Amino acid sequence: MRLVQALDEIGAGDTALIIADHDPKPVFYQYQTERGHSLSWQYEQEGPAVWKVRVTKGNGSVGRESVESDRKELDVRWLPPPLRHKVIFEKFDGLRPGEGFLLVNDHDPKPLYYELRSVRGDILEWDYVEQGPRVWRVKVVKTKNASGISGEAMTKFDLRRIPSPDRHPSIFHRFGTLTAGESLEILNDHDPRPLYGNFRLMYGDNFSWDYLEQGRDLWRVKITKKESIPPGRKQMPVSGEQLDVRPFPPAERHRRIFEKFERLEAGAAFVLINDHDPKPLYYQFAAEHDGEFRWEYLEKGPLVWRVIIGKTNLSR
């Protein structure tokens, strides 16, 4: 890829102007993970036909060698959630049998384990090295090549092979990282209709549910994330303050958002700007500040999400 080659040619501490016909940010994140070199960037023009971005290669590294000489560390904490599974799958598919890497994440990547097994089969070893509370490290080793499904792109969860307590949390976690128009597929040995009801409770009409197969022994359902904003809802008043968390590592974003919320006066609000749907943040607010916050989407992707977050007069 020409963009990757251009980044390779930039020396540590040097700056270059990147001109592209698409947003190069995903490549920047993936470059940091694959090459282990930190980057910082500033947009000078943001599309729609031309993107101009001034990028600087730092002197530091965002990754390091594992203590095992044949396994490199893949630190995905710097990647936006929608890109993490894609990068990890590409890394895994590029391995030869017996090779592996040390996966580093800011939450338990168990849903990824179930997805890998569902899509690629029983061709991996998965061993926890560290399990939180802030960092998870997992040694992932490919045991053999996949049989005829290596190129499969769709996210898939085979519920028959996932312990019951982990099924719904894994699916909802992965669905939350999808962008509008993307899909996941679930397989089960009976009609997963109860899951449909839970999706309606959590996502309303922002998804579609399509049966691909309704057999006696196998049921397949394709669930697609839709981009829709409920009509007829009034926009809440906002003071004009904004909190753009896109420049910050994912591990820092929730802390900054809640600090911003705590400083609000009752009745005040701010606009959160993010690079993916912050729906998991909504559920955290609902759990910790039920009845004390307001939430209103202004923009729903595909590149930028803007949400009004306000403090109600009921806040303590």
Image: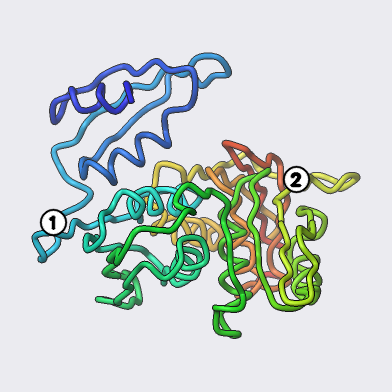
Q: Residue at x 35, y 58 (%)?
A: 145
The foreground one among 296 and 61 is 61
Image coords of residue 254 (percent x, y)? 48, 60
- Quadrant housing residue 143: bottom left
How many discs appear?
Answer: 2
Q: Is residue 160 left or right of residue 218?
A: left
Q: Which residue is mark 2?
A: 237
In the rendered view, tell whether residue 18 sits above or below residue 303. above
Image coords of residue 251 (percent x, y)? 39, 59
Q: Is residue 32 left or right of residue 108?
A: left
Q: Residue at x 35, y 56 (%)?
A: 77
Query: Which mark is on residue 289?
Result: none
Image coords of residue 266 (percent x, y)? 67, 61
Looking at the picture, which amino acid does disc 2 mark? Pro
- Quadrant housing residue 73: bottom left
What is the quadrant of the N terminus in the image? top left
